[in-house]
Image (tube, coloured by chain):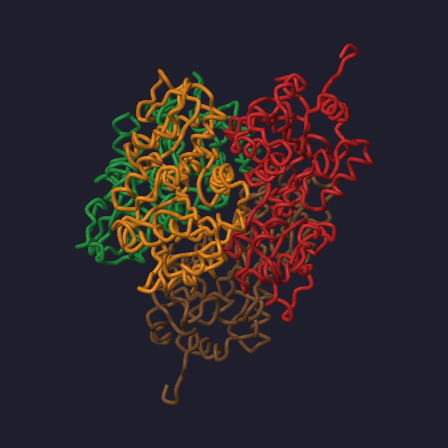
Chain colours: A green, B orange, C red, D brown
Amino acid sequence: MTNFKSLLENYKIIFFDAYGVIKNYKGLIPGIEKTFDWLREQEKSFYIITNDASRSPELLADVYQKAGLYHITPDKIISSGMLAKEFLDLKVKKGLVAYLGTEDSAHYIEHPGLDTLPLQQMSEDNINDITALVLLDDEGFDWMDGLNKAVNLLRRRTIPAIIANPDGAYPMSKREVGIAIGGLSYMVEKITGRKFIRFGKPDSQIFMFAMEHITQFHPEIHKRDILMVGDTLHTDILGGNKFGLDTALVLTGNLLPEDYENRIISTGIAPTYICQSAVIERDILD
Amino acid sequence: MTNFKSLLENYKIIFFDAYGVIKNYKGLIPGIEKTFDWLREQEKSFYIITNDASRSPELLADVYQKAGLYHITPDKIISSGMLAKEFLDLKVKKGLVAYLGTEDSAHYIEHPGLDTLPLQQMSEDNINDITALVLLDDEGFDWMDGLNKAVNLLRRRTIPAIIANPDGAYPMSKREVGIAIGGLSYMVEKITGRKFIRFGKPDSQIFMFAMEHITQFHPEIHKRDILMVGDTLHTDILGGNKFGLDTALVLTGNLLPEDYENRIISTGIAPTYICQSAVIERDILD
Amino acid sequence: MTNFKSLLENYKIIFFDAYGVIKNYKGLIPGIEKTFDWLREQEKSFYIITNDASRSPELLADVYQKAGLYHITPDKIISSGMLAKEFLDLKVKKGLVAYLGTEDSAHYIEHPGLDTLPLQQMSEDNINDITALVLLDDEGFDWMDGLNKAVNLLRRRTIPAIIANPDGAYPMSKREVGIAIGGLSYMVEKITGRKFIRFGKPDSQIFMFAMEHITQFHPEIHKRDILMVGDTLHTDILGGNKFGLDTALVLTGNLLPEDYENRIISTGIAPTYICQSAVIERDILD
Amino acid sequence: MTNFKSLLENYKIIFFDAYGVIKNYKGLIPGIEKTFDWLREQEKSFYIITNDASRSPELLADVYQKAGLYHITPDKIISSGMLAKEFLDLKVKKGLVAYLGTEDSAHYIEHPGLDTLPLQQMSEDNINDITALVLLDDEGFDWMDGLNKAVNLLRRRTIPAIIANPDGAYPMSKREVGIAIGGLSYMVEKITGRKFIRFGKPDSQIFMFAMEHITQFHPEIHKRDILMVGDTLHTDILGGNKFGLDTALVLTGNLLPEDYENRIISTGIAPTYICQSAVIERDILD
């Protein structure tokens, strides 16, 4: 068990997962603002690396701002939705992009040259104009209708299918989880035999995207200078490890203090460090 | 390509799949009544072996009766739901059985000693009384609500989870399919890490159940005397083959005349015979 | 934790798994002979239900005989290899059956009308005569040669591929496991896209095979009269449960006393009873 | 069907897959040297992006040199083994790295501070010193011994397990394939429940690695300037597409002219362009 503050001293840039590290279903992790104050004082940079494609970085940052975390501005947020956006920009230059998700999530597919279509509005009139399918969020549509339309679209059209959040489920409360859009996509893949393009941790592309962003301003930064902090072994830790980053597991989210050792052993996914939480405890003399 | 009638001469009992063989989304396969008339004349017995657990054998037979197929009586129908019923009878003798499906499908879980609960009515008050979960049909519940309840029930309670129809999807029209309850169950398994007990083709247990039924009346019947007729390689044909039955693939359902050869080669699932359809063409002199 | 002897009182027939229940890598489980003596005294019948297709029931029984377990005679042994044998008898009536395994394991594919071929002897001269592939045992062939031949055979010929032991691995010592033929078959399936026909627990067909055997002599026996005793959740217990039998988990094999509760919760596979071992402790006054 | 030469005009850098594009089991694709001559004349850059970790870039280039392809020098080769090397450098700074593969493949794990161990030499004396397992090649070890050692090592030690070539199989001749180390790794993953870190196409990290290499010399290069040329849908084309590159499928390898349309439709993986081959046909007036 490593002290989180002493760990931070060794890195120039910190990557934080959002859910389970900075916030949870009850709101902000108590005391987390001290961590961001300290990072500011120390002139250390940070990014939020999140699989949340339910809304734009602006709207995601807005939630932190309202909760008093003023340092988390939109430019600090790297979401998996931004990779879907880049993909469409590079590979799907025109046509109609169908999506499953809320209107807020559609932010990521709005591009010059592309029209967007909530999948529930797919019909015989427009199915042949659709040039890509993007799964953004588990809300904003009736599951029976939307999932059946996704299956039938992919059976009829050879188009890229993108999943902008690979998580299978997310915590809803202390005891309950909710099925996420990544979980729904497994089923569509299995039934259609088609493979979704998955953006988001543990896949390296989101870390690479963040690195490209950083090296614009700090070309000297090396992977060795970055610490990935997360609560989930098979996304944050596996992804960070594979990309070559040092990783710190915190116990304020998915994994409980009594479980983490067993889970590390059974999955074989080992963080570089384990910390109680991402909260810096600052004493009087600090 | 084998003539279906000449094939039937060699068997004492015929097992028919329902969907794609006797009926499809438009109603009965035209001419199929001649097959059942001929079987009656020849005093050959038959059973419908179906993964349809959406309603009782009585209600399933009723549809055939109304369409003029008077020989298909409830005792001729072996549905995967009947295996779920037997399982509950043997293994879950008391408590509250939660289910996903229509009220008609709940027929299969109604037992003396068991109470039934549509999963949408699960709450903190009754979750600890639930002794089994049975997935019967893709209709009768809101998918978001029902599937999330299924996931959370299985995370909290160590109880048997049964899927009474393993099919992933079913044809809705010439071009469209619908996701079936078996498809939904994949996702629940993947998210929870729990394994459903699956009843229905291709699993042998439904064929064994039919055999037990038959040998009560015809103890001399051997597997060699039975032909399984189906339209789907990975349920009807794989299951029939594995159980040791001769199998006949018909081309009136899932597989088109131009596709079946490729599919047999790519899956490695080969029927004993291939027939145009299960309709007996009877000429004037017959 | 249930006393094994008091449990046996309630059943007429006992099904035992072999490895981890009656014997382990060190030999017989100490004291297990008392259980079989007692069953004989009580005129209770028993069967060994095993996924071991490495040798014939005669040779399997021979090992018990030599170790002093005189009650375990060949007719008491139901092995998954016997189902492969029945399948070939019903479905592959002629031609050349290629196999991976030792010469002893080839017992299960020797049939009138069939020739057998160790897969290592496959060549351009005989590949077109092969009518089935059977994977029997992980020994008796060079893995690189044999597995490559299996992949290429299935790519070129549309023939049934049978796996007569679905276990992925087996214990070799207190700390070590060995990859079993079922484990090797996963890879062949994944690379070829072809589906093996799997015989053996947890699949119901081996239990059904045993039942057919029993009801020849004891037509009055019902599933309720049988107890399945095993050490492995996902084969013995899952299979027994699904078939409708009561099940007893013993802690002398795969699962340790400190682990079994966690494993039952994480897999959702719950035995009807849990016992220390299948050894009956008989006291002086017994 | 696009003319390959006219396609090349639109890109500044070309990524080539090796096997099926530049060479096959018979040697170089006839005429391929003309393509590399033309690229040189046009001052277009190229890289070979290969999942071959069986030997160092030097030894890989040597084969091309000997065949007369003098433009393919070691610095033009980006192999998946180089990512394994980078991972060890960043994440496994000390200890003993065990590997499966030939001595040539061990090039990728030789680092200051690390000792290497052919897995066949694992014993009770050194198992606790092993800090990573790397699967490099399917040759150089006895499969039964090596794969069993890999399974038991991962059961006992919580260490990173890396697969430096994710391909399941590779073509050996017109009709035959060979199981590759990626295929063997599936089995080890399935038996141990442990997840390998996979480097190589279709994963983005190899493309990113090539990009980092390129931008050192050509910082102005954008993904839009690069064309990925490959013969395999689920590695070259899927990987190139996901990374945001334009992709060209050639028909000199895995996919035959009569099959490619069906395979694109069934997998949903569509290249930007389809070309007969990567050979530039140059006529007299060219």
Eyeballing the image, is A95 above or below A25?
A: below
Which residue is situated farthest in the left direction here? A125
Q: Which of A264 and A244 is in front in this view?
A: A264
Eyeballing the image, is C208 above or below A68?
A: below
Can you see residue A68?
yes
Residue C97 horizontal side relative to residue A240, left or right: right
Residue at x 54% of width, y 33% of height: C238
Residue at x 30% of width, y 31% of height: B104
Can you see residue A16?
no
Q: Where is residue C160 in the image (x, y as percent from the top left)?
A: 55, 56
Eyeballing the image, is B242 above or below D210?
A: above
Tell me the quadrant of the picture where the C terminus of chain A can be found. top left
Residue B117 placement: quadrant: top left
Q: Where is residue C199 in the image (x, y as percent from the top left)?
A: 58, 45
Q: Nearer the viewer, residue C103 or D146?
A: C103
Q: Nearer the viewer, residue B185 or B254?
A: B254
Q: Nearer the viewer, residue C71 or C49?
A: C71
Q: Where is residue C21 in the image (x, y as percent from the top left)?
A: 69, 30
Residue C88 horizontal side relative to residue C284, left or right: left
Tell me the quadrant of the picture where the N terminus of chain A can be found. top right
Residue at x 67% of width, y 42% of height: C52
Q: Position of residue B137 (x, y in %)?
A: 34, 36
Residue C136 horizontal side relative to residue B6, left or right: right
Which residue is situated farthest in the bottom direction here? D284
Residue C176 horizontal side relative to residue C67, left or right: left
Query: How many numbered badges does the structure rendering display?
Result: 0
